[in-house]
Image (cartoon, grey):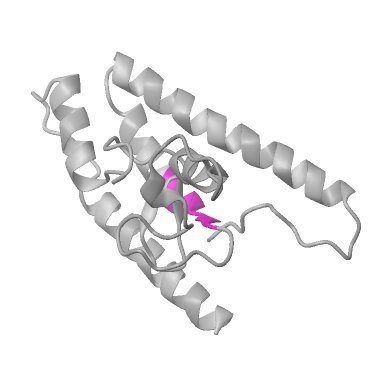
Amino acid sequence: VHSKVREHNRAADDEKVHKLSMTDSFGETATADEQWEQLCSEFSCSLCKDVLAAPVILPCSHSFCGECVYDMMKCTNDVCEVDPIFQVHSCPNCREGINHKETYQREFDYAILRRVESMPECDLKTEYHQRRDVYLEREKVSERASKKSSKGSTSTAPTAST
């Protein structure tokens, strides 16, 4: 079952990277705001409504910003400051239950990052980098902690899709 989920997730990831590479350039006369709006319309997180930063994929194949999923998952059944609808850990798009950790979409992330880097400097670009860096730093810390833990415990670090 897990290999079929991984295959499906990899196919969805490959399709997104292909779509991004097909639209790898902006119009020469587009402003930074127009370019950002184009990225948002193509690669938007349905939680924060911004460009996917450090995108992760859930078992149902929906993608979100890594930090958005982290914030959603830190809500418990007792206390949830974001939205009571997220008290049960399920996909915000399709409501499918989340039974294991999301997968960081490295290739998709790098493809979006290349597009963002091709844009002129602007506040939106700076905010994107901040959101991306927060998630990636959190995952580095998580990986280090899981390496230090005993072999018998399960890893909390995301798997990287290729």
User: For the image shown, how many numbered marks are present on the structure?
Assistant: 0
**Relative to the observer, which residue lies in front, 135 or 17?**
135
Q: Position of residue 1 (x, y in %)?
A: 55, 85
The magenta segment: 102-109
**Relative to the observer, which residue lies in front, 159 or 75?**
75
Q: Position of residue 141 (x, y in %)?
A: 72, 37
Residue at the right extreme, as displayed: 150
Q: Is residue 142 left or right of residue 85?
A: right
Q: Position of residue 64 (x, y in %)?
A: 39, 48
In the rendered image, residue 106 lying in the magenta stretch gets the answer: yes
Q: Is residue 147 left or right of residue 36?
A: right
Q: Is residue 136 visible?
A: yes
Q: Is residue 19 left or right of residue 52?
A: left
In the displayed structure, 124 sits above or below 4; it is above
Write the residue at 71% across / 43% down: 142
Write the residue at 26% across / 38% down: 49
Residue at the left extreme, as displayed: 29
Write the residue at 43% across / 60% down: 90
**Relative to the observer, which residue lies in front, 155 or 35?**
155
Q: Is residue 126 left or right of residue 124?
A: right
In the displayed structure, 75 sits above or below 26; it is below
In the displayed structure, 90 sits above or below 9; it is above
Write the residue at 31% across / 37% down: 51
Q: Is residue 121 visible?
A: no
Q: Position of residue 138 (x, y in %)?
A: 63, 36
